[in-house]
Image (cartoon, coloured by chain):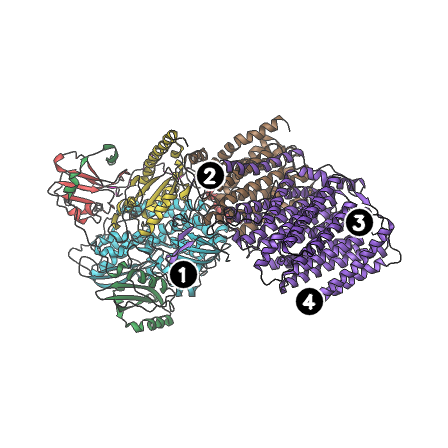
Chain colours: A yellow, B green, C cyan, D brown, E purple, F red
Amino acid sequence: MSFLKKSPWVLHYAATSCNGCDIELLACLTPTYDVERFGIVNTGNPKHADIFLVTGSVNEESRKVVENLYAQMPDPKVVVAIGACALSGGIFRDAYNVYGGIDKVIPVDVYVPGCAARPESIIDGIVKALDILEERAKERKRQRKVVPA
Amino acid sequence: MSLDEPFNDLPLDQWVSTAERHRADGARLVQMTGTARGDHFEIMISYDKDYRCANYRTRIPRDQPELPSLSGVFLAAFTYENELKDLFGISVPGLAVDYGGNFLRTKTKIPFSGDVTIKKEKPKKPSAARKEAKPANASDTSGPEV
Amino acid sequence: MSNTTIIPFGPQHPVLPEPIHLDLELDDERVVQALPSIGYVHRGLELLAERHDFIEMANVAERICGICSFIHGQGYCQAIEQLMGVEAPPRAVYLRTVWGEISRIQSHILWLGLSADALGFESLFQHSWRIREMLVDIIEETTGGRVIFGVCKVGGIRKDVNDETLRSVRRRIGEIRSAFDEIANIFRQDATVKKRTVGVGVLSAEDAHALGAVGPVLRGSGIARDMRQLGYAAFGDLDWEPVVEQAGDCYARCIVRVREVDQSFDLITQCLDRMPAGEISVSVKGKRPTGEAMFRLEQPRGEVCYYFSANGQKNLERFRVRTPTFANIAPLVHMLKGCELADVPVIVLTIDPCVSCNER
Amino acid sequence: MNTPTWLLAFGFILLGPLVGALLAGLDRRLTARMQSRQGPPLLQPIYDVLKLFEKDTLVVTGLQTLYLWGFLFFMVVSGFIIFLGGDLLLSVFALTVSGIFLCLAAYSTNSPYSNVGSSRELMLMMAYEPMLILVPLGFYLVADSFRVSDIVAGSPWQVLQLSGILIGFLFVLTIKLRKSPFDLSSSHHGHQELVKGITTDFSGSDLALVEIAHWYENTILLAWLYLFFAPLGLAVALPLAFVLFFAEVLVDNTHARLKWSSTLKASWLVTIVFGVTNLMLLPLMT
Amino acid sequence: MYSISFLIGFSLLAGFAVAASPDVETRSRRVRLSASVIALASVLLALFHLASGPEFFALSPGVLHVLDWMFTIGGVGLALVLLYFCRRIVAREWYIPVLVVLQTGLMLSAEFAEVTPEVAHPFYIDSFTVLMTLIVGVVGGLICIHAIRYMQDYHAHEKTVPNRQAAFYFMLFLFLASMFGIVFSNHLLWLFFFWEVTTLCSFWLIAYSGTDEAVRNGFRALGLNLIGGVSFAAAIAWLTFGPGLHTWELDQLIAAGSAMALIPAVLIAVAGLAKSAQLPFSSWLLGAMVAPTPVSALLHSSTMVKAGVFLLVKLSPVFYDTYAGLLLSLIGGVTFLVTSLVAVNQRNAKLVLAYSTIANLGLIVMCAGVGTAGAMWAAILLILFHAVAKALMFLAVGTTEHLIGSRDIEDMEGLVYRRPAMAAMMLVGILGMFLAPFGMLLSKYTSFQAFLSMDVMLGDGLMLATILAFGSAPTLFFWSKWMGKLVAMPRRLPPGTDPIPRDEAIALVSLTLITYVACALFPLADKVFVIPYTDYLGALGLIPVVAASIPWDNIAIMSLMLAGLFLMPLAFWLRPPRHAEVSGYLSGANVSGSASYRGAMGVERVVESRGYYLSGFIREDIMMRYGMLGAGVLIVVMVGGVAL
Amino acid sequence: MSWSWFRISSLVTRSALAKPATRLYPFEKRKPYAKTRGHIKFKINDCTFCTICATKCPTDAIVASKNDKTWAIDHSLCILCGNCVTDCREGCIKLSPQPWPPMLTKEVLTFRKDYGEPPPAIIMPR
Ligand code: NFV
Ligand code: SF4
Ligand code: SF4
Ligand code: SF4
């Protein structure tokens, strides 16, 4: 079994979101939803994170940040896009300054719909991401066995 | 509310002196903004004293978009003027803290000057959708059982 | 060689839930200079008025920000109604007022939590948010959304709230109020909280005025200016006074918010007492807004200004929002000079920055 | 130096981190409950570290791993000395060396956050070091030896004689355990101005090393607490040490973070008022 | 005896020979040769007198008489030379010539007194002396070798400074000769002469560059040391004319015990305090940092200032269990505490070293004032470890300054990558200065023990122990900060390429090895240098005898730590872990692959991290002022109290 | 420290002794409020494919076509504003209080009249 599943540390970045989804995400960390039950900790630091939770529709400035944060996360990692904005741009998708959708910038593994995405959905999304994370960890182990370092 | 607080036209050369007058009067700078019109920009400004707003509007030509800075009178003006600079491409000589067009950084430069337009696109034809339609993968997509 | 440490504070920073960037220059830990730069949340939604007609635009206005979402929707709808010359029915107006105040309380409690967090007071943060969640439940029950209410529409509101629910809201508000009192007293009296906030980030009344501060920042510096005094919505009928604190430091701003929460509880009870019966919306079919005007409302963070210019078309000609955070940027830069690195998050938070409002 | 003490010392090397991890787990659980939350499972810290070993390690410079090994090594040495019944003062010195290695590791990375973090960490060391040194001095005065084995065999009244020192030690324990109000250099929960402070630029196995060293540190600090009560016998001393250890969680949850200058002033003041005064009065008490 | 005269005489002759060299090449060769011979001779001397008790040497009356006259003439000559230099002083420093005249007058009056004490043994050797000889000979020799290249570079950089290298080396060797004189003399008058010669050398070398600042600082050093000189002369006068003890021999003085010898001992102690720059006198040593770095290394850290504490430690049995001793310790303590704190403020590497030197000397003075075997043990080992590590640090800073063009600690950022060898040596030096398992920390350990077992009045030892505890904390802070700078990732500058000059490399590498070996072999050092000395004093009944203080398991564990410090880098170097390298965390605003980020106003900025100097928290001027005041009061109380 | 410390400590201790406020979400689900806006639920039976819902949708999440008798919704676009619900005259669209579950790919849910009832979902990955 992979321990990644038992201790997913998340990094949250609001890439051009309206705050709605971010608040819901923060609410997940607080007593009512308390995702620390699953070992989830909001690290605030890409180098410690396993799951990248992104909200918002991404504009030019935040694109650079998102790319950088993604690059600074050590493998294995997954990306969860939260909210209509992060999925497709939502209501802002026609605005001139947004790309619309995190997947235009970095590969996204789980899409959590909603505007704002509800804490329950976010928890579900993270749980889904955990399976992918474990899959990746296993994959890496297999590869390591094939090519001894 | 504020339908009774109309915008008064103001010649550009009284821009600063009006600000000074309001400042001496103890008013507060509420906001500054612009609108792009055909061949000119309208710049609007509002001062507030005791919940009453005095609104002004001045026009500056597109070919010479220059607005004297009010940041010497109201320091608060610097954010608005930087914003005007970034969104409308108006140059503001005498700006106290000049970000040089990097205050509100946007993908397209000076997007509010009228070059960028956002029109409603035609809805896609669903026939396109049908072509690639394939049967559902039940496990992934079935909605919640309600 | 200079002795300055240069730190990029943000855009991604755990203390800031939202992306804003500050170039910090420090000497030891004293801030020599702090330069903000923004643009991480700019969407250009004012231009979306070209894309959406004035009715749909209310949805966009609500999504300027997820924290002060409702008041944006309310302000937008009120303004369009005035430009069209229609009047929303009184029940709608009162419900809007109630929701507006609930939204203010949830914003303030949210802020109290975040600022406790910036002070390193994790348990206080958690408890604040626990209480906020009780409020969010009310919001969800009455509107169907947790952060984006989605109940305002041009001409009134979408869904009525039945009287039984209103009674339960009233009861629950009382419960929340007593839970909040406990937290509020900690914010008011706790020694370490005071140690970190009293005398930090002082903004004098003159500076606050000259720098154009608004909202709790201005009121924390001893100037009583609250746009609800304009009497929009039901505020003209209600009985209240703006909250003012004199010191102008972080503590004063914190206390202003704590007291405003109390005040909003009062206002809600008053509204519920006087809740009129009747229609909740009027039809605006075939009417179009015309003219231009500036409208001001009081958001949790202070005065918000909307500028509309409409010419009888379906789409607005120009829609512009000047948000309170935008007005508070200049005071922020002023306050940051000479503080300590540890104070930076505290001072930044006491203007309660809302970046998505700020950049639209 | 007989067989049982050697067993104890090597037992520390093997089981020390486990005990420390359980302490950390309990701590997290208790913290959560104080915040009205359910909290993570008890073994969460262990899951975390095992996970970190599964992750890639990104470094800014290869050398940082070396310094972290130094951190761990000296931490183990410090605990080893105590459990061997050795010299407490030497153990303090080893603990200091280990702390300095952690700072070096953080200094060697590029992020200004970790650099400021390690400057702050050094500042904190400067704040708690005098008190930490006064503890062995106090023991020396009552047990006439720096040796742990002699202290354990000392008089049961020593904790009363050293009550001021104990208070001072509890105070700096808050700093050592990185608890609010002194959680300045790195942070339990990521919401402070320094991101993760010292550990900002460590990842994967590097971070795991830090965590393991912290587990050792937990055990060592618990052992220090235990020493105060040791002559009372295991059955009394251990629960007392536990209670005091977890009193720190309450402190953590009831204080805002202070700034470095207040921390420095406060801890030196406490050191003087409680530690030094206690030492000065000691001759009168014996 | 021959070895003594050889060391003194050869050094003097070497000075003349070097000064008379026709060209630069010859001079360098002669310096190298003489320095090696001196170092070798001191090692030989050490081998001959390994772990033995003291030996005293008598001279035939004729020789003694001639030498007496020579020293008298020398003393007068010295005074004249000093007065000659005094022509450049400014009005405010009128007291300097007065002091010169005063001390010479006191000296001469003692010398031509009607009854002068007999001096049976003008020279002696004991294990402590042997240690000092090794320090002067080996460390001093290495510093001289380092100076060869350093001075060439120095003159290449400082065009305005007149090239007086011949005289410079003469002064260095003259200084070495007089240092040997100090450590071997049992004859107090002779010792005093050598003492004053070192003052002269120090003054001249500080003022070497001839700039106004240098000259001013030189005179400050001269003036403050002359105050000590006058006090020393007064002690001699007391011993000649005063009631009670009537001797010119150091060992007699010490053996007389505190009841008899306290007054002259306190007077000499004042001289020692001035020489080792303790607090009211500290300012001269800070000013002395304008001198070329080898001078700072030789005179102002590893040897000359040690002469002061050397004498204090010698007199330590006299201070055992006296209030005077306690006051002396407190002066040391105040110095230690204040200068350690002030050092946190400094970013100029040489000033940090200067403050830390004063602080460490303060620590030694603290031990000297206690006067028990344990304290002496600590003091002597402190002298050893400090001399070696500090010389290494000074030379390393000097070389680094020439390599990177700055002596600012901030500019040493990333030296580990830019100059790995230099950084490694500096790291060893720094580790040697304050960290376990290195010697300095060991000595601190023993000092704690010694303090806690002292017993002059209630709480005395605790006071000292507390001072030590509080003073060590800032030491830890500024040294670690410095190390942090060295290991930091360089943000701008590429690695340097030009090699470390050979002479400098020889000196540096040797000192590094000595530092390491001294720590590894410290149980041996303690057997060879300290125990014989303290045992001898114990046998004389001057101090209580105690068993060796460090238990074996501590030694074992320290060896383990030392081995760890050595093996870990080795293992790492042999099998480095391979991890992917990325740039540091910059809040997501990184410009890829660098240490810069996208800042406000659209500019790209390089992050910078400066160390903490706490300049708003610790105020150098205020702290120093209060420190001086406190220590001044203590001195007055000490001297006044004893006199009454 | 002062007496103010007791306020927070009492709060914290009481919380530690009381039951946590946590909703154990995936294990215990609470009953949604009637008004809760979870996702858009569509019943094709009465749909006349008038496309009003599509035009009123501010994000164009709905695409309806009379010719093909299809109605499609992209849940990744829908902002749950409820416009379609109020504007559909046939009452085909409802707001369900359950949120739409997280997805591994962005997909459009397409309904086609021919298939009758119950309508099988047809997926078009984007
Ligand atoms: N209050 C508020 Fe807003 C608005 N308008 C503002 O800055 O929060 Ni998002
Ligand atoms: S999805 Fe909705 S709530 Fe979330 S960020 Fe976008 S607009 Fe805000
Ligand atoms: S769902 Fe309703 S509005 Fe939409 S196409 Fe069908 S009938 Fe028309
Ligand atoms: S709820 Fe709103 S966004 Fe969603 S499909 Fe209906 S109209 Fe479109």
Q: Secondary structure at mark 4?
A: helix
Residue tagged 2: D206
The residue where tag 1 is placed is: C331
Q: Amino acid at mark 4?
A: Arg
Q: Give the residue furthest to the front.
A: E22
State the CA–CA distance, disc 4 to disc 2: 62 Å
- Give the number of the mark in front: 1 or 3: 3
Which chain hosts label 2? D
Residue B143: quarter of image? top left
**What chain letter is assigned to the residue under label 4?**
E
Q: Does the residue at mark 1 contact the one at mark 4 (Cβ under 8 Å)?
A: no
Q: Nearer the viewer, residue E295 or E498?
A: E498
Q: Which residue is mark 3?
A: E186
Mark 3 and ligand 1: say if the CB distance to the nearest ligand atom is below 8 Å: no
Q: Which residue does the numbered mark 4 point to in the structure image?
A: E88
The outermost residue toward the top is D3
| Element type at mark 1 | helix
The chain ID associated with circle 1 is C
- C-alpha gap between disc 1 and disc 3: 75 Å
Which stretch did the figure color magenta?
Answer: F15-40
